[in-house]
């Protein structure tokens, strides 16, 4: 393990600030890329759902031949016919189709919110890892300095022990403190390497385990409207999509009205070729589908119920996370204030001791 740690320590160091790390994570994070792909897929699904209600134009051609008998039993000569034309159609009324398109649009909104949430989460993970790596590097530096001080004191005491001016137990104690400080420094350096590697992984940068990080000062959490949180927006969009599908399943029992028309050039044996056209409106009303409609309505209702539960869970999780983050910030601020006071007291004590030494 020590050899591996030394190899990591000799690896090249990457320098970047917190803002650079956050931007790199948003651009390169796999979770963000997955969210972007989900948005693109949802947009394609929405376009597909909408396309069923848009006008459609089709070119067609046909050819046929046939023969038969007259009413008197005489053979009828074969008759050939052909046509080449264009046919168009458009949906005038289809509540279920419109409901499906609305549900698909809501799904797009939900995936867009999930993309924003993935970006927020990527920035949060980088911030947490960055500050933890800074802390580990600071601990490693502090323990290294402590080890150096212990080494200096041990060397000085060894001379005094050899001269008979200090007991051997004092040297043993100093060497134990030196070994403990070196062990703590190695542990802190190992933590810093692991955290730097994690940070580089979040950024999808070359993983060297060595980071040249810039000090940061994090202010108080910014107040934000919980209603605008991407997780809640996504949950509400999912609920709206489920409700739209439920509405579509119910309206699927209603009629569908379609307009259609065609223009074609025809050729029939024994008849002069010409151009003809037709136009009309068609209405269909489902009467019986083997229980399919009932199953669709029940499935849509179950999906809407599940979406309601997911929304409630998201609201609860957000409340818990908000309270936890606020408490953590307050604790960290109190700890920093206490450390600042302790540092001031230690500086004052050192000043007094220095003044006393000079006076003596």
Image (cartoon, grey):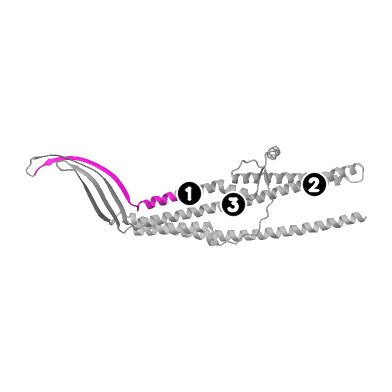
User: Going by the image, does 12 lie left or right of 67?
Assistant: right
Q: Secondary structure at mark 3?
A: helix
Q: Which residue is mark 1?
A: 38
| Residue 64 seen from this side | yes
Upstream in the sequence, badge 3 or badge 2?
A: 3
Q: Secondary structure at mark 1?
A: helix
Tell me the quarter of the image containing the N terminus: top right
| Membership of 20 in magenta stretch | no
Magenta range is 42-70
| Membership of 46 in magenta stretch | yes
Residue occupying image coordinates x 43% and y 55%: 105
Label 2 CA crowd tier, 10 Å (few <14, some 14–19, many 20+): some
Residue 222 got which mark? none
Q: Give the label, 2 or 1, closer to the camera.
A: 1
Q: Which residue is mark 3?
A: 123
Q: Which residue is mark 2?
A: 177
State the residue in front, 84 or 311. 84
Distance CA(mark 3)–CA(mark 1): 20 Å
Position of residue 154 measured from the top left corner of the image (x, y, whole percent): 84, 44
User: Going by the image, does 302 lie left or right of 209?
Assistant: left
Distance CA(mark 2)–CA(mark 1): 56 Å
Residue 297, compared with residue 171, is above or below; it is below
Look at the numbered discs 3 and 1 and tell me whether their residues touch, using CB distance below 8 Å: no
Tell me the quarter of the image containing the C terminus: bottom right
């Amino acid at each position: 393990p020590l050899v591996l740690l030394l190899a990591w320590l000799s690896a090249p160091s990457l320098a970047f600030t917190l803002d650079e790390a956050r931007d790199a994570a948003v651009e390169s994070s796999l979770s963000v890329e997955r969210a972007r792909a989900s948005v693109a897929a949802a947009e394609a699904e929405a376009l597909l759902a909408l396309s069923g209600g848009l006008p459609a134009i089709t070119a067609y051609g046909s050819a046929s031949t046939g023969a038969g008998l007259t009413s008197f039993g005489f053979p009828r000569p074969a008759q050939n016919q052909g046509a080449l034309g264009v046919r168009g159609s458009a949906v005038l009324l289809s509540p279920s189709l419109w409901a499906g398109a609305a549900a698909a649009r809501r799904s797009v909104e939900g995936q867009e919110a999930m993309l924003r949430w993935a970006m927020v989460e990527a920035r949060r993970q980088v911030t947490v890892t960055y500050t933890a790596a800074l802390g580990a590097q600071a601990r490693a530096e502090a323990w290294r300095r402590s080890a150096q001080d212990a080494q200096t004191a041990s060397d000085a005491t060894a001379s005094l022990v050899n001269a008979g001016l200090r007991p051997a137990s004092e040297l043993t104690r100093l060497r134990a403190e030196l070994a403990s400080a070196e062990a703590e420094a190695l542990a802190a350096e190992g933590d810093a390497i692991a955290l730097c590697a994690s940070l580089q992984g979040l950024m999808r940068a070359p993983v060297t385990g060595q980071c040249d990080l810039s000090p940061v000062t994090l202010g108080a959490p910014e107040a934000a409207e919980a209603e605008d949180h991407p997780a809640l927006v996504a949950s509400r969009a999912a609920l709206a999509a489920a409700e739209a599908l439920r509405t579509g399943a119910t309206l699927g029992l209603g009629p569908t009205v379609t307009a259609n028309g065609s223009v074609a050039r025809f050729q029939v044996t024994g008849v002069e070729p010409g151009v003809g056209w037709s136009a009309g409106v068609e209405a269909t009303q489902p009467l019986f589908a083997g229980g399919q409609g009932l199953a669709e309505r029940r499935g849509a209702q179950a999906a809407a119920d599940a979406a309601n539960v997911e929304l409630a869970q998201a609201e609860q999780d957000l409340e818990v996370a908000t309270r936890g983050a606020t408490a953590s910030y307050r604790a960290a601020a109190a700890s920093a204030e206490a450390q600042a006071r302790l540092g001031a007291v230690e500086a004052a004590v050192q000043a007094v001791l220095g003044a006393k030494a000079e006076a003596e």
